[in-house]
């Protein structure tokens, strides 16, 4: 290739290559200088930081700060297993650390005892000694061991006895007894007749299947001599007996993991015995609750016994029930406090089947003040309900204030669905089937003089000017068709009729 180049071109190429080498040398020199500048910059930065924030040897820190560091690490031990028993580790760092850590009784006020760890009983004795006048938080973690060894089971019994013997030192007790081989009643037996003067917080966790398989009565009676400071109770698959003397003092209860029938049967008694509760059943994120096909006894306890009144769901928007009767609806409206479901927008009540109810009592009257708790309700559905006329009359009634102004129940209601096809309260069983006309849809007959839908018509007419129903859904009948509206309910903007 070079043989074909002219002498002038060869000289130019050699000159360019020489220039390139010179530039590469300069580049290397500049990069070296830049690295030197960056290194010097880092050195100066470190000097500035050292001047502003001088290093302090941990041994020179005051005792209070050392204790605070260990306390912070203790707070992490529930999420970081590597930090467990940090107080024990810190007490072996140096002689000064040991003096400081052993002298801080608050660092020895929380302990976890586990099934199968034979040294735990000795460790509990150490914590009792080092905590001195501080009360203890004790977690008995007996839900992670198979319990196959009788010796291990006896160790647990002995350990429970030791903890019970020092109940005067305990302010917080957590008992987790969900492992196979350790029945709940056996676990709490040492605590039955005790007096716990400093106990403030109690948690008991069991296996939900124990409530049926291992023992018949899920109620637990403990601290029968009293626990005057107990305020918070957390239970899983456990229900306290309503005879426990400390129930009236509770302000917070959390219960879960129980069979529905068992819980609903026992909860009203617990709530009745605990008048100072500030938190009942808290469901802060619940947006929809559906209770379908419950047996009658469970439904009665859920609605009639006011278990629902103890559920606090601030963002709940939808409630649906099936298998209800008219009396359940009146109980619901009369017994739900305003603070329980402030965001409720949709409410559905449905009968269990198409069979007519012949034994249901007449629902209680729902006074206007009961609807103050449902000011946000926009959609109401009632399907095949007994005593439909009585309920509709209460739901759509109007009343007068002291100043003479008119008050409407459920002022935000926009959609009303009433399906009464299979009930007789509106006399629908005696209504003749309607002859069809392809042009008019149905023909109205003058055969009956009494309008069984009169209550509904009156309620709609009273609301038409200020709080009209925007969407009404009804079964098609000769008393209520698309072509049979009275002038006084003309403002209704939408109508849908179900085929009979």
Image (cartoon, grey):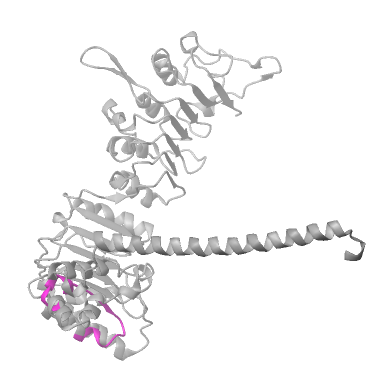
Q: Position of residue 329 (x, y in %)?
A: 37, 37
User: In the figure, is residue 278 to the left or right of 392?
Assistant: left
Task: Give the quarter of the image for residue 347.
Answer: top left
Furthest-top residue in this view: 487
Q: Position of residue 236 (x, y in %)?
A: 32, 64
The C terminus lies in which quarter of the figure?
top right
The N terminus lies in which quarter of the figure?
bottom right
At 14% from the left and 70% from the top, the residue drawn is: 106
Q: Nearer the viewer, residue 171 or 129?
A: 129
User: In the figure, is residue 457 to the left or right of 226?
Assistant: right
At 44% from the left and 61% from the top, the residue drawn is: 38
Q: Nearer the viewer, residue 426 or 159?
A: 159
Judge whether residue 115 is colored magenta. yes
Q: Is residue 222 visible?
A: no
Q: How many numbered discs?
A: 0
Judge whether residue 118 is colored magenta. yes
Task: Give the quarter of the image for residue 126.
Answer: bottom left
Task: Give the quarter of the image for residue 72.
Answer: bottom left
Q: Position of residue 429 (x, y in %)?
A: 53, 29
Q: Nearer the viewer, residue 465 or 477?
A: 465
Q: Position of residue 59 (x, y in %)?
A: 18, 75
| Image: 401 above or below 175 | above
Q: Which residues, given as a range, are shown in magenta?
A: 102-122
User: In the figure, is residue 439 to the left or right of 204?
Assistant: right
């Amino acid at each position: 290739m070079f043989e074909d180049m002219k002498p002038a071109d060869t000289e130019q190429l050699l000159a360019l290559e020489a220039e390139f080498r010179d530039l590469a040398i300069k580049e290397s020199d500049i990069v070296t200088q830049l690295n030197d500048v960056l290194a010097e910059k880092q050195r100066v930065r470190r000097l500035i930081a050292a001047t502003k924030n001088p290093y302090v040897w941990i041994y020179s820190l005051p005792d209070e700060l050392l204790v605070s560091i260990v306390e912070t690490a203790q707070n992490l031990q529930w999420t970081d297993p590597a930090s467990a028993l940090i107080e024990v580790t810190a007490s072996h760092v140096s002689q000064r650390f040991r003096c400081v850590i052993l002298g801080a009784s608050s660092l020895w006020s929380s302990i976890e005892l586990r099934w199968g760890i034979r040294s735990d009983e000795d460790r509990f004795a150490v914590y009792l000694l080092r905590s001195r006048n501080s009360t203890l938080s004790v977690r008995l973690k007996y839900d992670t061991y198979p319990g196959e060894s009788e010796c291990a089971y006896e160790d647990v019994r002995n350990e429970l006895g030791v903890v019970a013997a020092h109940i005067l030192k305990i302010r917080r007790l957590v008992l987790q007894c969900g492992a196979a081989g350790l029945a709940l009643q056996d676990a709490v037996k040492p605590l039955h007749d005790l007096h716990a003067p400093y106990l403030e917080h109690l948690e008991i966790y069991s296996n939900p299947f124990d409530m049926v398989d291992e023992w018949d009565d899920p109620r637990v009676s403990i601290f029968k001599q009293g626990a005057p400071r107990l305020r918070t109770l957390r239970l899983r698959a456990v229900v306290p007996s309503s005879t426990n003397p400390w129930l009236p003092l509770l302000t917070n209860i959390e219960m879960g993991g129980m069979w529905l029938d068992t819980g609903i049967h026992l909860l009203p008694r617990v709530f009745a015995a605990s008048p100072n509760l500030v938190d009942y059943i808290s469901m802060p994120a619940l947006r929809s609750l559906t209770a379908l096909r419950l047996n009658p006894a469970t439904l009665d306890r859920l609605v009639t016994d006011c278990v629902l009144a103890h559920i606090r769901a601030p963002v709940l928007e939808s409630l649906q029930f099936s298998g209800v009767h008219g009396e359940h609806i009146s109980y619901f409206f009369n017994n739900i406090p305003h603070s329980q479901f402030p965001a409720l927008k949709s409410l559905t009540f449905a009968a269990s089947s198409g069979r007519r109810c012949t034994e249901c009592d007449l629902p209680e009257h729902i006074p206007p003040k009961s609807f103050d708790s449902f000011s946000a309700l926009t959609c109401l559905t009632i399907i095949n309900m007994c005593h439909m006329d009585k309920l509709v009359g209460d739901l759509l009634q109007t009343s007068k204030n002291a100043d003479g102004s008119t008050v409407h129940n459920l002022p935000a209601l926009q959609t009303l669905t009433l399906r009464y096809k299979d009930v007789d309260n509106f006399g629908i069983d005696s209504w003749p089937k309607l002859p069809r006309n392809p042009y008019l849809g149905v023909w109205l007959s003058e055969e009956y003089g009494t309008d069984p839908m009169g209550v509904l018509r009156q309620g709609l007419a009273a609301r038409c000017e200020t709080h009209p129903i925007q969407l009404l859904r009804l079964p098609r009948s000769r008393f209520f068709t698309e072509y049979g509206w009275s002038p006084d309910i003309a403002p209704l903007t939408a109508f849908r009729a179900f085929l009979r």
